[in-house]
């Protein structure tokens, strides 16, 4: 076999090995992405962070009955959205976003709420 044929054969083999490596890397990345997606979804579902919307009164009643949370603060966003923060004595908290049509959505929830002393116009 002459040198040119040997080089062609070796370069083809190297190309096949590279393609096999590329395929393995692609599969590794794809499997990793799927595992990461499931981990994020499972964590969000377990923590209750999946966006939940409904009539404002119904959600407020649920926060009161199930978590003993009461409205702590409220504010407007862009003159057409209202944000409300509900807090319980045990430290659980929920942030609601209320749209102009009255629908409320839970946008964040957690625990270990702490009040921080604050005076308007001062830095905390």
Image (cartoon, rainbow, N blue to C red):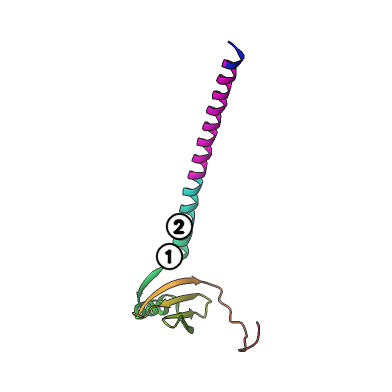
- Crowd around label 2: few <14 · some 14–19 · many ≥20 (10 Å): some
Number of callouts in the render?
A: 2
* Residue matched to label 2: 41
Which sits in the foreground, 93 or 120? Answer: 120
Residue 81 sits in quarter: bottom left
Q: Which residue is mark 1?
A: 50
Q: Which residue appears at 41% of the width and 81% of the height?
A: 80
Give the x, y percent position of residue 16.
52, 27
Q: Quadrant of the C terminus?
A: bottom right
State the quadrant of the N terminus. Answer: top right
How dense is the environment of label 1, judged by Cα within 10 Å: few (below 14), some, or many (20 and up)?
A: some
When the figure is inspected, residue 110 is found, relative to residue 9, above or below; the finding is below
The numbered mark at residue 33 is none
Q: Which comes sooner in the sequence, label 1 or label 2? A: 2
Please report the bounds of the magenta region as a residue range.
5-31
Q: What is the quadrant of residue 60 in the picture?
A: bottom left
Furthest-right residue in this view: 123
The magenta stretch spans residue 22: yes
Residue visible at 50% across and 36% down? 23
Looking at the picture, does residue 13 appear above or below residue 30? above
């Amino acid at each position: 076999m002459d040198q040119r044929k040997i080089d062609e054969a070796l370069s083809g083999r190297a190309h096949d090995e590279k393609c096999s490596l590329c395929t393995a890397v692609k599969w590794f990345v794809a499997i990793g992405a799927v595992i990461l997606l499931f981990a994020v979804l499972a964590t969000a579902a377990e923590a209750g962070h999946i966006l939940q919307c409904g009539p404002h009164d119904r959600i407020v009643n649920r926060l009161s009955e199930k978590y003993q949370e009461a409205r702590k603060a409220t504010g407007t966003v862009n003159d057409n959205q209202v944000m409300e923060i509900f807090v319980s004595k045990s430290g659980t908290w929920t942030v609601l976003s209320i749209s102009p049509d009255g629908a409320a959505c839970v946008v964040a929830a957690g625990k270990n709420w702490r009040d921080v002393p604050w005076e308007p116009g001062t830095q905390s």
